[in-house]
Image: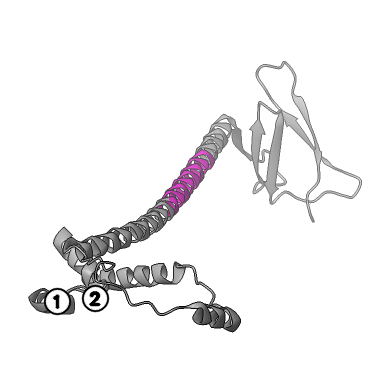
Amino acid sequence: MIDERHEELAALYALDLLEGAELTAFEAALAHDAELRRLVASLRETSAALALAAPSVPAPSANLRARILNSAVPHAPSPGDVIPFKLPAWFGWAAAACFLFAALFFAGKSFNVRGQLQLALVSEQAARIEAGTLKNLLEAERLLSRGQLDRLVATETLVADLRRQSDIARLKIASLKSLAGNSPEARAVAVWNPDSQEGVLVVSKLPALDADKDYQLWVVDPQYPIPVDGGVFTVDA
């Protein structure tokens, strides 16, 4: 951070108004302070811009210059016509102060522009951070929704398994054996669903019949006075 004293010395140095010990001390400080060197460079650019901004006056034509010289009459001023004039001692410091104020004004404008640029950069960084935060929130919401969906699927699968187990628990399974003397090794397994009134019959070692004959299945239920017709079936030879 440059203090106020060094800013004043920098303005005078940029205008080549430092002399003697102040010049030596300032140049020594300038050699070790990069920020001070940048300030001096900025002030010199500002003073150069002010010099270039002054309007240029066109040179008089050769004809006009000749007429002015021809009309000039030598005149020796009398001692009474000469009015001694001496610039006050503070005039140089006043001019330096004017240049200093002008330099500080343009330097302030430059600092203001840099401040606005830094503010824009900070705003851009904040916008990027906000966009990144929003992206993370959306990703977290997506993962949460996916997790909820997975849990829902798992719950539905569990419910389906429980329903299947419940259905299996309600099934009626019976193992049958032959009472006929011609097929003592015949076996059968019957699975009956009382809810859907459907079932499956699996038989083994049951003798094959002639092509014009079928086996008849009868279901004996104590709730019914007579056996229930379960349909006909055949076996492979």
Give the residue drawn at x 41%, y 51%.
123
Q: Secondary structure at mark 2?
A: loop
- Where is residue 118 shown, x and y percent of the image? 37, 57
- Where is residue 178 shown, x and y percent of the image? 67, 41
Magenta segment, principal secondary structure? helix
Pick the front one: 190 or 107: 107
On whether residue 43 falls in the magenta region, the answer is: no
Q: Where the N terminus falls, by quadrant?
A: bottom left
Say above or below: 137 vs 39.
Answer: above
Pick the front one: 46 or 57: 57
Pick the front one: 180 or 200: 200
Spatial CA distance of label 2 from label 1 is: 8 Å
Say above or below: 166 vs 63.
Answer: above
- Where is residue 40 shown, x and y percent of the image? 26, 71
Query: Which quadrant of the figure has residue 100?
Result: bottom left
The residue labelled by disc 1 is: 19
The residue labelled by disc 2 is: 16
Q: How is the image coloured?
A: one colour
Q: Secondary structure at mark 1?
A: loop
Q: As shown in the figure, which amino acid type bears the numbered disc 2?
A: Asp
Q: Where the C terminus falls, by quadrant?
A: bottom right
Give the residue drawn at x 40%, y 51%.
126
Query: Which quadrant of the figure has residue 190?
Result: top right
Q: Which mark is residue 192?
A: none
Q: Residues within 10 Å of mark 2 (few under 14, many from 20)?
A: few
**Highlighted magenta segment, given as a residue range:** 127-154
Give the residue drawn at x 79%, y 51%.
208
